[in-house]
Amino acid sequence: MKKEADFHLSDPTWCGGCGLFGIFAALKKAAVSLDLDPEELVIVTGIGCHGRLNNYFKSYGFHALHGRILPLASGIKLSNPSLPVIGISGDGDAYSIGLGHFIHALRRNISLTYLVVDNRLFALTQGQTSPTSDMGYVSVSAPYGTKEFPLDGPRLALASGGTFIARGFSGDPKQLASLIEKGIIHKGFSFIEVLSPCVTHNKIITSQWFRENIARVEEDPKYDPKNRTQAWKKLSSKGKIPVGLIYVENKPSYEDLILPDKERPVVFNDLSLDIEKFEKIMEKFQ
Amino acid sequence: MKKKGNKITDISVMIAGKAGDGVLFTGNVLAKILKREGWWISTYRDFPSNIRGERTNYTIRASLEKVYGRANDIDVFMAFDCGAVVEHADKVAKEGILLCDGIGIAHTAPSRIEGRTYHIFPLRKLTRENFKSEIYKNMIALGALSHILNLDFRIIEEIVSEVFLERKGKKIVEENIRALQLGCQKAKEMVQSEELHPLVNKADSGRLLLSGDEAIALGALAAGCRYFAAYPICPATEIWQWLAVHFPEFNGLVVQTEDELAALNMALGASYAGARAMTSTSGPGASLMMEAFSLAGMAEIPVVIAHVQRVGPSTGIPTKTEQSDLDQWIHGAHGDFPRIVLSPGTPEECFDFTVKAFNLAEVYQCPVVLLTEQDFGQNLRTVKKFDMTKVSIDRGKLLNQEQLEKIKDYRRYRFTPDGISPRALPGMKNGLHMVESNEHDEYGYRDEDSGNRIRMMQKRMKKLESATKDLIPPKVWGDKESKIGIIGFGSTFGPIQEAIAQLQEKGTRSKYLQMRTLWPFPRKKVQEFLDSCQEVFVVENNFSGQLSRLIQSQVQVPFRLKNILNYSSLAFRPQEISSQIQKVVQ
């Protein structure tokens, strides 16, 4: 049985109070409770403060290009489905430069777990406006306030055919860990948006603000995460930001549908040439 | 047309009409018939980027000697409408024959156009009178051609069965054969015996008729590629479409991605996990891939990118040929990183170089580009059967579990004398490492120290030096003693070879350096070639002479290089090359 320490490579150097500490803790918790091995887990990160996670978390890691986490992680998972693959992005990564990939990953339903760390701005590049920044938000890139409406990741995910949609809060690593666990077990694409304050650049959307403005969906006894209509209503309501498992659906995963040999991942193919088979194929060109 | 005595040794048949007329289908069946009759085939398609309505033509050249391009003239011309005649009549040889459906013709057709015999051959009318569907006009046209060319009807029937029996059933096969016979009969009634172009057939020796794209796909399969991710784009899609059919049988995976950004990133993910992975693209797709191309260089992930060039810039002309993306693959993408660019000139080389590309990519842990062109990417050529016993797979310093466990302190990017580090795959025991798109240390973790940066940069670039001995060298063709040199790459191979023969006939001896690896640049061989010449012509399908510029930047050129350029969107005719050389050397 692994311990959390087995996944701890080094102490993070994020700003004190950064939401990423909670995410780091939740990931370790989830890995332990699923009894994963650092050598079988692959974590793909994007560009942003979250991208440093691979430097602190012990596993196979890939710090990818800005916004391209999902296609890269998909390539890993499809060629070796025996590996649990977690993708982590920031809101800029997932909802701005990589948005096209996000929608297609949702509809494709490959068994990846995707955490989008939403701090509502670009932190690593000094606090510019991001697609989830509130209308009117003043930043170095929008000194007179942004004039764009924010993007809603979970609603977009639901509309795009997502089969596992959840939202967590970095200030509640226990709940987040349980969502990540469920996400990893889920057959198909699991998307978890993580509300995570940036203590350095965002003085409005703070940890305290999140605490006051979120509500757990499981506190509503009538809420059924298998009900798509309820999920849409919940995500669209004007009240507090819903956190927890918002929507889950059983659908065949892409790899189950497309892989020719379910028992033998593509990476374990014997590459030596079956000459007889090949000669037969060449005959078609005669 | 070429003749030896009375015997035709080289002939070109053009079929023309509008997109949607079935020009490609008719041409492909004819090409297959002639291939089976023992001819070497080279087809040429001149198609618009449009499904219906616009002008289109397809030329099938058959020769008793191996050919890799189009001829100067058309000998037999079958037009589905008069517009095609207006457009192409001047390309028909003086002793040639034209047949035209005559649809929409307002006046009596002449029996000759400037000496060429001309017949109104009422394809559509015949179809309407005898068949329920207009689709049979293609087979009627083929029937007429079979009479003019004196084709073997048994072979035609055999191919028609292969095409239709499984898909459409016996009844449809019979209807098609009836259409063929009708076309043949009508042509017999109409065409005079002196207008015929009878072909004397030999037995086929089991050669293949395929496109460069298909040869790349076959090469990928043979090389052990089992992961292919791409976005649809002309003229590269045939690679993927072929693999999509055959990969499942070999436990391989073909994924259609949302764009080319995803395609190359996905291939890199699969390769990182241990699969032999590939993508294919063209024009704007290649521009989108530049970002991940640079990642492959930094992260040292093997990958093969097949780029079938089309006309640029921008959307350009998607279905026509050009060689204007050389600069992009050699100089494109941000940062300095090792890359290998190969340029096959024939379908045989497409197959061989694809196998080689996968080995180079894995041995040197870098991206390898297979740069071809629409000209032979989509057009068909006859080749000898590929020799599978020559295919070998070299996975370089890829570690197996046993080897990895023996290593103390495994470092994915360990500094080594040849710059190549032993490679572990995710999921392996004792191989934990990080792959960083940022500059990194030997373990893969981000490291921005300038000393480390210098060492890492040198390590990565060292791999190209190590690769030099392993690359495909340029090849010299023609008269090695001649002082007149020609340099080219890719699909200009065929027209240059024929231009050399044409020059030879006029008493001018020349030689040709076929560039087969474009990067790393084969300096020594190119320098030797230049030093042995007094005059060198660089033949390229682009406006600015990208190869010529590359040569000048890499070696000492003792004289001014002369460019022979063609950016018309059409492949070179041999004459265009030989006449320009003849003018200068006389």
Image (spheres, grey):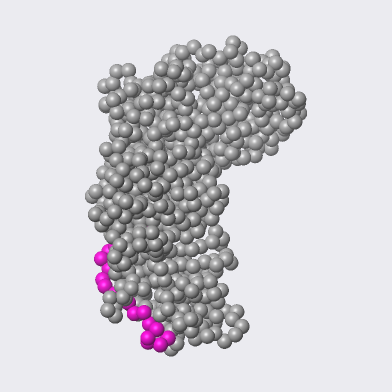
Which of these two is toward me, B331 or B103? Answer: B331
Magenta residues? B191-211
Whether B74 is drawn above or below B290: the answer is below
Q: What's the residue at 75%, 25% (across, down)?
A: A145
Query: Was residue A164 drawn as part of the magenta stretch in this picture?
Result: no
Quadrant in the picture for residue A161: top right
Q: What's the residue at 52%, 75% (across, down)?
A: B85
**Quadrant for the C terminus of chain B in the image:** bottom left
Whether B425 is drawn above or below A174: the answer is below
Instruction: Name the spot of residue B335 as percent of width and height, x first.
Output: 47, 31
Q: Is residue B39 left or right of residue A192?
A: left
- Taken as a whole, is the magenta stretch helix, strand or loop? loop
**Quadrant for the N terminus of chain B in the image:** bottom left
Instruction: Name the spot of residue B488 as percent of width and height, x first.
Output: 37, 52
Whether B370 is drawn above or below B410: the answer is below
Q: Is residue A284 left or right of residue A64?
A: left
Instruction: Name the spot of residue B259 as percent of width and height, x first.
Output: 53, 43
Q: What's the residue at 56%, 40% (across, down)?
A: A104
Which of these two is toward me, A81 or B52? Answer: B52
Instruction: Name the spot of residue A249 as percent of width and height, x first.
Output: 58, 37
